[in-house]
Amino acid sequence: MKAFDNIKVLDFTHVQSGPTCTQLLAWLGADVIKIERPGIGDATRNQLVDMEGADSLYFTMLNHNKRSLTLNTKHDGGKKILERLVKKCDVLVENFAPGALDRMGFPWQRIQQLNRGMILASIKGFGDGPYEDCKVYENVAQCVGGAASTTGFPDGPPLISSAQVGDSGTGLHLAFGIAAALFQRERSGRGQRVFAPMQDSVLNLCRVKLRDQQRLVASGVLEEYSQHGDGIAFGDTTPRAGNDSGGGQPGRILKCKGWQHDPNAYTYFITQAAVWGNICELIGKPEWKQHPHYATPAQRLPRLNLIFGAIEQWTKRKTKFEVMAACMPLKIPVGPILSMKELAADPALRKSGTVVEVDHPQRGKYISVGCPIKLSDSAVQVERAPLLGEHSEEILRQMLGYSEAEVAAIQTAGVV
Ligand SMILES: CC(C)(COP(=O)(O)OP(=O)(O)OC[C@H]1O[C@@H](n2cnc3c(N)ncnc32)[C@H](O)[C@@H]1OP(=O)(O)O)[C@@H](O)C(=O)NCCC(=O)NCCS
């Protein structure tokens, strides 16, 4: 048994944000039917192509465990099939540009008439407001959601993060909304709309920076930011904080042995107050434990550059893994800067199923990220992404009850 067994999802998603959401639903047991334009499919099938004639990794890594049905929803025959699908499914997920579902002839009112229990889940760039009609991609979402203005170093331009907080982050928000709507439907019998705008989702993930905005307005200073120790005045908005910790326990990225030639020979090091004594012993500064400049978090805040400089003198003599090994028994929170190469080979991630090897008929074996959420009673088996239209006939026949002759006619008309 799986968490979403018997839940049928009509998956109108494409690119990254929506597919992230529906892939999660599929991993947790939902029957996800990906609707794609005949002959074209999700644009990502042919983006960043690394192997001629094969679906790209971009597509295959975001569409595991789904079935693919090609369907021209602008064709009258296609609309009839879509109508049947809406009646049969529990959730419709879409991340079209604003208004596309209405233009297709399936506004929310019509969907409700066809299926009162249907949950319609949408991702758009913006919520209601002046930008509601805009198309949005990942990096735009990072910019308009506050991530870019608070990422980077104070003396440099805004930066985009490689963590896909706009796309995948919004997909996660939407998946939670869908699970909540399914749970409510158990009691109300009614479906509902679930809407996750990308700007709002990114802002939610930047919550701590909006916290800092208010702290800054109140006091004119953010003491845990390096900028404070550097004596640089704050402006009137949350600045970029480089690699400073965003929390109450100061942290930095520090050099480790080999940093001169290895771009990832670094560690993150957090000076958690609870283990300050251990840190002092470890780096050879036992006198700092009681020293009036270093003994308490408040005394340390204006001296963070000096403190981290001293810690770095210690980390620079060790590899990032030696730092980890030395800090672990002392309960000092550190973490090596791991490269994608290291993560791909990580035995623990392989064992947990977060890094998986998948076999694909066009491309052979490839590595992907499996389900990062572990449910003890809903095991995940990662299956390859579908080929374009691979399940069209099976869905028309078995799920929608079309006869062999009807399917042939539908195919001849170019509807699927
Ligand atoms: C991502 C995005 C910018 C891509 O824009 P796009 O490539 O122009 O794609 P659209 O979503 O506008 O869809 C294009 C058209 O294809 C049509 N289409 C899609 N699937 C179809 C199908 N199976 N059959 C027939 N037509 C189909 C749509 O109806 C739409 O037609 P319309 O413009 O006449 O209404 C846009 O979809 C968007 O802003 N989405 C919301 C935000 C989002 O999720 N962004 C993150 C992407 S990772």
Image (tube, rainbow, N blue to C red):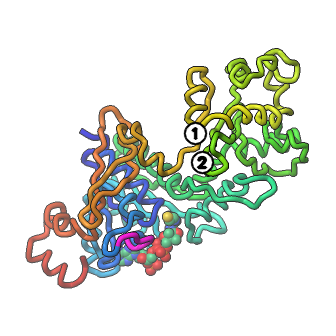
Q: Residue at x 74, y 34 (%)?
A: 313
| Residue holding disc 1 | 336
Tell which circle, 1 or 2, labels the residue nearer the N-terminal end.
2
Q: Is residue 241 above or below residue 395?
A: above
Q: Which residues are magenta?
A: 45-51
Amino acid type of disc 2?
Asn
339 part of magenta stretch: no
Q: Residues within 10 Å of mark 1 (few under 14, many from 20)?
A: many
Near-viewer residue (192 or 411) = 411
Left or right of 409, for residue 108: right
Q: Which type of secondary structure does the marked residue at label 2 adopt?
A: loop
Tell me the quarter of the picture where residue 413 sits.
bottom left
Amino acid type of disc 1?
Pro
47 part of magenta stretch: yes
Place of residue 199 in the rendered image (x, y in percent of width and height, measured from the top left): 61, 58
Q: Residue at x 87, y 51 (%)?
A: 235
Query: Does the rendering let one see residue 97?
Result: no
Near-viewer residue (79 or 206) = 206
Proximity of marks 1 and 2: CB atoms separated by less than 8 Å = yes
Identify the disc placed on residue 264: 2
